[in-house]
Image: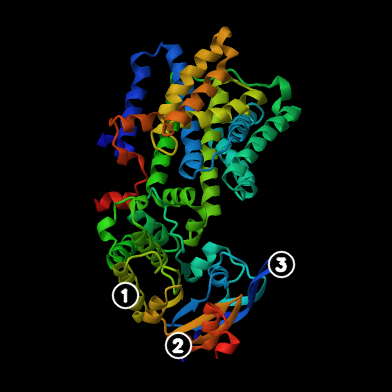
Amino acid sequence: MTEPLLVIDHVSKRFGGLVAVNDVSLTIRRGEVVGIIGPNGAGKTTLFGCVVGLLRPTTGRITFAGARVDGLSQHAVVRRGICHSHQIPAPFPFLSVRDNVRVGASFGRRRHEVGRVVDEILTRTGLDQLATTPARNLSVGRLKLLEVARALATGPELLCLDEVGSGVTAVELDRILQLIRDLNDEGMTILYIEHNMRAIGAVCGRVIVLDFGQKIAEGTPAQIGADPRVVEAYLGAPIADSA
Amino acid sequence: MRLLRHPYLPALAVAAVAASYPLVRPDDLTFLGVGFLTFIFITQAISWNIVGGFAGQVSFGFAAFFGTGAYTTALLWSKAGWDPLLTLPVAGLAAGVVALLVGLPVFRLSAQYFSIATIGVGEAARVIAINADNLTGGASGLILPFNVPDKSWFYWAGLAIATITFLVSAWIRRHRLGLALFSLRMDQSAAEGLGVPTAFFKNLAHVVAAFFVGSAAGLYVVYLSYAHPDQVFGFDLSIGMVLMNVIGGIGTLWGPVLGALIYFPIRQILLSDPSLVAVNLLVFGALLILIILFEPGGVLGLLSRAGVVARGGLRFRSADEKRAE
């Protein structure tokens, strides 16, 4: 097995009396695509926020490539190699698509490389045709692609995607999934939060299920689909006398 | 008007035309004086726009930098005997240091709270200056040496400082710093999430802006041969910088220049006519309401709607994007 890239070690996050993430530990190895699923309110986005530097875990530690990243400011986390896409797209509305991507590419990289990196990413995400369009004119599907493109522009080792497959058309979803597979083939590690089980099944080698802030199951997509605890978390416990 | 898209050449052309005036009419002292003061106000407006426009951090405390620069020059010139011209960079640096000290805590506040806090900063600076009698002359001000160059010299010096400020602002707008400022204005947390150290860039923009405001302030007190806390730290200066940008077109390259050209004459007329002094704030207040209600883009927004200026010319365009076209 390859070395662990991201280690989440007994991480909890409380908001006042609410325990959003409760003592979760998990390891992501270099080159994996790991999915995180769970019902609404399971703590997916909170855990994700702790990883990408938006939130500070209440207890526990997160190490990335051997160094602690919890508690760093967000731009510092990005510089270490973790970048994320937003669940609700947050484009820079009055900047062109190209300049949106340039924001991701311009900081922490040598100036003469920026143009080439931006061109490459625009081409591979298929946004090159829209390069000069202001981001506010894009459809939801394109905005999700732009989210991924901007995150890629920072040159991450670990790409964290938050529901990039929700609210897009089937064609756009296929395009995004293909992009994820291609990136993974090139060696990128991906952490993918999603509601859409088809998307998870299509790209993830391993899936982690959260419920009420705790990790309740972990395995391949097929194992997860057959796990009674997962079915229970989503659909509720079977009625006793119907068994 | 494609011309406005090229940032440097039109500015240099306008500056060259303006610079020729004292050669043609060296004895038109009124115009040279008004011209000099206009250049000082243009410099203020362009500098403010780097922070308030590009980065969207609307500050009402820029008088603190103007006053700091003004008194730095005043003291170095009258007490330490420096050549006034040599004091200008030092005045700029002093203002920059104040901007950094102010910015480090205040930029932690989000937009509206930042604006409110800067009102306090500007007023606090004025009150401190009024009470620091032995340094600033307090309420009686500081009389400075009277052996100053002629008005043509001031006119050219003011023009030079305004032109340099404009070129720096245009350069920032096209390059990485501008990209950082524009992105954090539109969505600060998204910019952070893409690796932009937003606090650093806000402070950098603040210090650069304060440098030019402070240098211009130094030139201003040399021209007046007099420095008074209420004058160089006055809240009306801070408000003026906001107003000029709102009038001209906030966040644009030429907006602050146009705004200053409109604001300054109106202000002079209102302040010089005894029957109008009382209503001067009323006039600007009404103007502010009208602009925000009907054309938040200011004069440039109006021109853009009328098709005189290309719409695309007003939005952020990086140097890289222009090459790509």
Report if residue B150 is visible in the image. Answer: no
Left or right: residue A175 compared with residue A199: left
Outermost residue toward the front?
A: A241
Residue at x-position 39% and y-position 14%? B26
The numbered mark, 2 or 3, whose residue comes first in the sequence reads: 3
Locate the C terminus of chain A and report the quarter of the image it occupies. bottom right
Residue at x-position 42% and y-position 85%? A205
Q: What separation in Å lies between label 2 and label 3 (alpha carbons)?
A: 34 Å
Could you tell me which secondary element the residue under label 2 belongs to? loop
Residue highlighted by disc 3? A17
Q: Position of residue B51 (x, y in %)?
A: 51, 42
Which amino acid type is shown beneath numbered disc 3? Gly
Residue at x-position 45% and y-position 83%? A30
Left or right: residue A135 compared with residue B88: left
* Position of A182 relative to B190 (above/below): below
* Position of A103 relative to B151 (above/below): below
Residue highlighted by disc 1? A178
Q: What separation in Å lies between label 2 and label 1 (alpha carbons)?
A: 19 Å
The numbered mark, 2 or 1, whose residue comes first in the sequence reads: 1
Residue A26 occupies which quadrant of the picture? Answer: bottom right
Q: Are marks 1 and 3 in contact (CB under 8 Å)?
A: no
Q: What separation in Å lies between label 1 and label 3 (alpha carbons)?
A: 41 Å
Q: Is B319 in front, or is B312?
A: B312
Q: Nearer the viewer, mark 2 or mark 1?
A: 2
Residue highlighted by disc 2? A220
Q: Position of residue B97 (x, y in %)?
A: 61, 43
Which amino acid type is shown beneath numbered disc 1? Gln
Asked if badges 2 and 3 are on one and the same chain, I answer: yes
Report if residue B238 is visible in the image. Answer: yes
Could you tell me which secondary element the residue under label 3 belongs to? loop
* Figure colour scheme: rainbow
